[in-house]
Amino acid sequence: MTYVTEPTAVFGIDIGKRELWVQREGETSTQRLPNTVRAVRAWLASVPAGALLVMEATNTFHELLATSAHAAGLQVVVLNPRRSWHYARSIGQRGKTDRVDAAMLARFGAHEWTTLHRWQPATAGNARVAQLLRRRAALMKAKVALGQSLSTLRELQSLRRQTDQALARMIQRLDVLIVQAVTDDVQLAPLHQLLQTIVGVGPVVAAQLAQALTRLPWRTPDAFIAYTGLDPRPDDSSERHGRRTLTKYGPPLLRHLLFLAAMSAVKTALWKPIYAALRARGLETTEALVIVARRIARIAFAMFKSGQAFKPQQLTPAARLA
């Protein structure tokens, strides 16, 4: 991570679809402005050079401000909402309003500016793949919800099947668009092909991994695993060893697709004995699959750094259960 000089000012911005709430650290007043190109650019013109802007990733509503602020030479931090939620709890924030959240983000930035990753805009190809993957996830969610909610209504079964088939066709079409978008990008295309050599990783999962691996300047595999949210959170104190849970700090879609890849992988001759060994250790099904998903992510990171294809023979017994 590259550290920067201390910001000249810190602003917390709570972002909505139509408006922004802006709070400067050290001040009590909050500014409210439309989330439009004209309003954002006008406000940025008043922001001191070298200032730090802290916001949450809010669907795509934060992208206008983040992109414009970065282009203006300002420092930008886009937080995972889960992280800021934990911070709000740690400082005893009891309520939640746009004004309160803006002040909390400003305080967070003022106290933690040395440890926060500075946001960088994605390349056009990376952004395109990310957008298509989000659309695919939304359709998959709608397809599952439709099947669950209408499964017992006989009167609607014919229409449900037609809708289900239509959604399936749209998902198939999106899969084609995702692969095409990856293929058209000179950075993503070779990595996408490389990642598909991992047993259990198909075109869509490989696209998500390629997009994530090239989005930020990862230095260590642990940093990438932390980004996926598949890293375990310890819960130990003195002689007590609590049950570990996942941090789930990273993008849910990346974590979900890695889990699906693990489910596919454990059905293969390579991964099946690994999964069986994990289950024999007393791990639950989900716990074992998470370990396999985490291992796939580590392998993908190593391949990204080395540029070498997956070699099943290098998956030694010790490494298999890591």
Image (tube, rainbow, N blue to C red):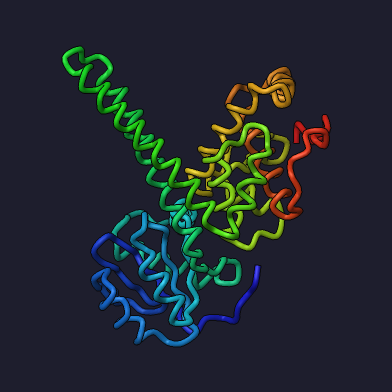
Q: Is residue 233 visible?
A: no
Q: Is residue 291 above or below residue 32?
A: above
Number of marks in the rendered image: 0
| Left or right of 17 on screen, residue 120 | right
The quarter of the rendered structure image containing the C terminus is: top right
- 70 left or right, relative to 138: right
Quadrant housing the N terminus: bottom right
Residue 226 lies left or right of residue 164; in this view the side is right
Q: Residue at x 39, y 39 (%)?
A: 173
**Does 88 appear above or below 263?**
below
Query: Is 196 displayed left or right of 84 in the figure?
Result: right
* Residue 157 visible (yes or no): yes
Observer-nearest of 293 and 134? 134
In the picture, residue 315 is in which quadrant? top right
Residue 262 image offset from top left, x and y in percent? 61, 31
Residue at left offset 60%, top offset 78%: 4
Percent across and percent down for residue 38 are 26, 78
Depth check, front residue: 20 or 133 = 133
Nearer the observer, 188 or 277: 188
Q: Residue at x 41, y 79 (%)?
A: 26
Pinpoint residue 269: horizontal percent, then vertical percent: 71, 21
The answer to which image quadrant residue 246 occupies is top right
